[in-house]
Amino acid sequence: MKKRITAVLLALALTCTAALTGCVTAAPVSDGAEGKQLTVAVNSDTGSMDPAGSIALTYLAYSVSALDELLTFDENGDIEYRAAESHEVSDDQTVWTFHLREDACWSDGSPVTAADFYNTITRALDPASGSGYANYLFPIENAEAVYNGEAELESLGVEMPDDKTLIFHLEEPCVYFPDLLRLPVYTPSCAKYADSVESGWDKNPDTSLANGPFCLAEYVPDQYFVLEKNEYYWNADAVSLDRIVYRFFDDAQSMANAYEAGEVDVATSLSSTVMEAYEGQDDLFVTDLIATRYIYMNLDVEPLDDVRVREALNLAIDREALCSIVGSDTEPTRSLVAKYMKDRNTGEYFVDGAEPPFEEDVERARQLLAEAGYPDGEGFPELTYRYPTLEMDSDTAQVVQEQLKQNLNITIRLEAQELQANYSARHAGDFDLCRMNWTADFADPFTYLSMLTSNSTYNCSGIRDEAYDALVEQAGRETDPEERTALMHEAEQLAVGEQFYIIPLYAMKSVNLVNPDVTGIRQVPASGALEYRYADIG
């Protein structure tokens, strides 16, 4: 009872905060509709819903219920076929053939064809589309050359002998290729309507067709979007919900308040105060998030082009103290690869297979800064740290600012930005220091290591390291599991423990509130995110 009272008191406080800030969104018009409806609170409206475009949180919420990839992996690591019903791979692992389901249909009843997958791929390979995932197409023959304008689209190693067969010809063996298939650029977009990332087809229910269990029925910018059951889905009999409503909220407090008020059934990505308030209750659903929160340093900005400065910044941050302030849902990390990502070969956490890339050492940090020409911080320019206006990021920014002032006597100016503006600034390279968070897209360390390669579309900080590129490339084609793991550890050590290209901060747990009457929620094994496609309400 005491814990319940604590939760109610917290909710009252959140209600007051929401009333003052005015950040509770309007109720969806579908609230009065018949049937089983699940309402989910999510972070603010961000990015495109076109898998070939510049996607962010909104697409991730939408796609997990509305789009079927060719195949995925379940929690046991076994293949789960979705848009495809079978596949073959050549002995040298360079030719992958997928056979689409004969009964796979779009939400308007038209058939899903190989051309729909090709449509996303080719549009993503146009740099104008702004896809951050385009480089994950580069294992395909000539894909990188097409992206760079050095080859014609006709040379791309994608073959469609008929409407239901899709063949990928790879440049060389790629042991993690099946993992890539869950990425946006490998999912289909209906060739009849999905013509451009700028045309608006992706948020128009008449043209935004889905091949998954649910399809878009309504989209109200900055308020909510509604998914309704796709009656043409090949596995529709296994889908219990009639609709899923995603409501946008500006902050975690508003989401927690909406849950307590019974306005939503699920509230995701909440603060550690909620975890403490709901401890021991059935509503609380805490999972390991396969994600790393870190800081990008722009190597094109002085003095961040000096490795001694980058190392000093890393060594001067007390991550234990940082996490004690930010919240009990965080845990210090000194790695880029997510702390909770498992090594498939050993079943243990990947980061535990090697020593941490570095250890914190304030005295060493001061010495390095002096060697770089800034004794006791003298003459060090004021750098700006840009971060989203989220509570966790604001707290993090203030602690980092204070620690760097205390330990190195340097001044960091803080600049909070709306989430979408922060994404845009980072992608444009318009920053000195910028907050970065990466939740794994697939269950392999390559999802992290590949982001720092010279040709990565997510490399926003000017990293150009031939030795690192070579290690990551070698790891990508290595077929011996132990050798591949060793190469990936070597690559991470080079990037994070020798060149200090990033400032890793902490790993996180995902704090969620879920109505106990809701069943069948699954976790996406690759990321730890919640999946509602087969959920039900008792």
Image (cartoon, rainbow, N blue to C red):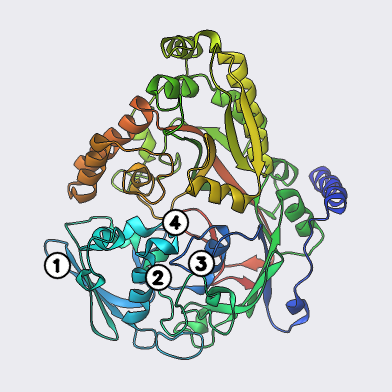
Q: Disc 2 to disc 4, how far (Cα)?
A: 18 Å
* Tag of residue 90: 1
> Horizontal and vertical percent for residue 329?
61, 39
- Identified by mark 4, the residue type is Pro
> Closest to the observer: 448 or 274?
448
Image position, residue 504 (x, y; %): 48, 33
- Which residue is the extreme one toward the bottom? 109
Q: Which residue is mark 4?
A: 525
* SS of the residue under disc 2: loop
Q: Are marks 2 and 3 in contact (CB under 8 Å)?
A: no
Q: Amino acid type of disc 3?
A: Val
Q: Relative to 314, does residue 102 appear above or below in the rendering?
A: below
Tag 4 or tag 1, which sits nearer the N-term?
A: 1
Q: Are marks 4 and 3 in contact (CB under 8 Å)?
A: no
Q: Are marks 1 and 4 in contact (CB under 8 Å)?
A: no
In the rendered structure, which amino acid carries the disc numbered 1? Answer: Ser
Which residue is denoted by mark 3 in the rendering?
Answer: 64
Circle nearer the N terminus (1, 2):
1
Q: Amino acid at mark 2?
A: Thr
Q: Earlier in the sequence, mark 3 or mark 1?
A: 3
Of badges 2 and 4, the one in the foreground is: 2
Quarter of the figure that contains the C terminus: bottom right
Upstream in sequence: badge 2 or badge 4: 2
Mark 3 closeness class: few <14, some 14–19, many ≥20 residues within 10 Å: many
> Which residue, given by chain and number where applicable, does mark 2 sit on?
187
User: Mark 3 or mark 4, which is nearer the start of the sequence?
Assistant: 3
The structure residue drawn at horizontal position 16% and vertical position 62%, both measured from the top left corner, is 93
Query: Looking at the image, which is closer to me, 530 or 278?
Result: 530
What's the residue at 38%, 23% (across, down)? 307
